[in-house]
Image (cartoon, rainbow, N blue to C red):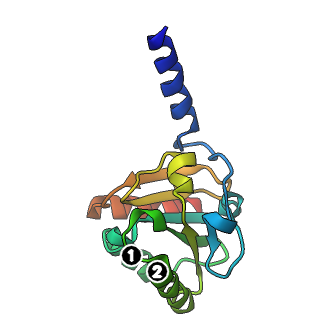
Amino acid sequence: MKKIVLVLLLSLSTLLAIEIGKVPLEVIIDGKDGGNVKGTSWSSSMIQEKVTILFYVDPDEKSLNEELSHALKEKEFDRDSFKSIAIVNLKATWLPNMIIEKLLKSKQKEFPYTTYVKDKNKILVKKWKLADDNSDILLFNKKGELIYKKFGKVSKKEIKKVIQLIEENL
C-alpha cells in the first residue's frame, strides 16, 4: 500500500512539473507572495503572444547566467516579438527583502523592457517544480509552450542554442 501511495505522489508531482512542449499551469504571484516590482500582480499567462525568456533567480546566484543576459542584450531582439522576465526568489537568500526590492526597482529603470517580479514564497518552485537556490532559465514560444529549460549555469554552446531557438520562434 505504501508503495502505491508513493508512486501516485511521484506521478502527481511529475504531472505538475513544467515540461518541454507544454504550456505550464497558470500561476499568479501577488499580495503577500510578491508580484511585479511596480506593485501589480504577475500572471504566467503573460508569457504568451511573444517569445519569452524567463529567468528565475536566487539573488545569491544572480551572476550565474550573466553571459546569457549579455548575449541576449547584444542581439537586440524586436520587442514587439520578444520579451524577458526576471523573477527573483526572495525566499532563497539571507539578504533582506527590502534591499533586494530597492535593487529591483533600480534594475527596472535601467532595463525597462524586462519585467521584474518578486516571488516571496517560492511559488514557482512549488507550482512548476523549478530548482530552488539556483538560476533557472525557461524559454517559451508565442503560444506559451516551454521550448527550453535549464536549471543552473548555461554553457556557451547552450547560449547559442537559446539564441537559435529565439530566432526560430520569433
Q: As drawn, is 95 to the left or to the right of 126? A: left
Give me the residue at 36% from left, 59% from top.
134
Which amino acid type corresponds to the residue marked 2 in the rendered image?
Ile
Q: As drawn, is 56 to the left or to the right of 22? A: left
Q: Position of residue 148 (x, y in %)?
A: 47, 52
Say the numbered circle drawn on residue 22. Answer: none
Q: Position of residue 83 (x, y in %)?
A: 59, 72
Q: Nearer the viewer, residue 2 or 114?
A: 2
Mark 2, Cα crowd under 10 Å, few <14 / some 14-19 / many 20+, is some
Give me the residue at 57% from left, 59% from top.
169
Q: Secondary structure at mark 1?
A: loop
Give me the residue at 37% from left, 53% from top.
151
Any part of residue 65 in sight:
no
Q: Secondary structure at mark 2?
A: helix
The residue that disc 2 covers is 100
Give me the residue at 36% from left, 63% from top.
160
Indicate which disc, 1 or 2, sits on the residue closer to the N terminus.
1
Indicate the quadrant containing the C terminus: top left, top right, bottom left or bottom right.
Answer: bottom right
Q: Position of residue 155 (x, y in %)?
A: 27, 61
Circles 1 and 2: CB atoms closer than 8 Å: yes
Any part of residue 68 in sight:
yes
Q: Which dot, 1 or 2, sits closer to the camera?
A: 1
Q: Position of residue 80 (x, y in %)?
A: 67, 76
Q: Nearer the viewer, residue 47 or 119?
A: 119
Q: As drawn, is 26 to the left or to the right of 85? A: right
Which amino acid type corresponds to the residue marked 1 in the rendered image?
Leu
* Residue at far left of view: 156
The residue that disc 1 covers is 95
Marks 1/2: CA–CA distance = 7 Å
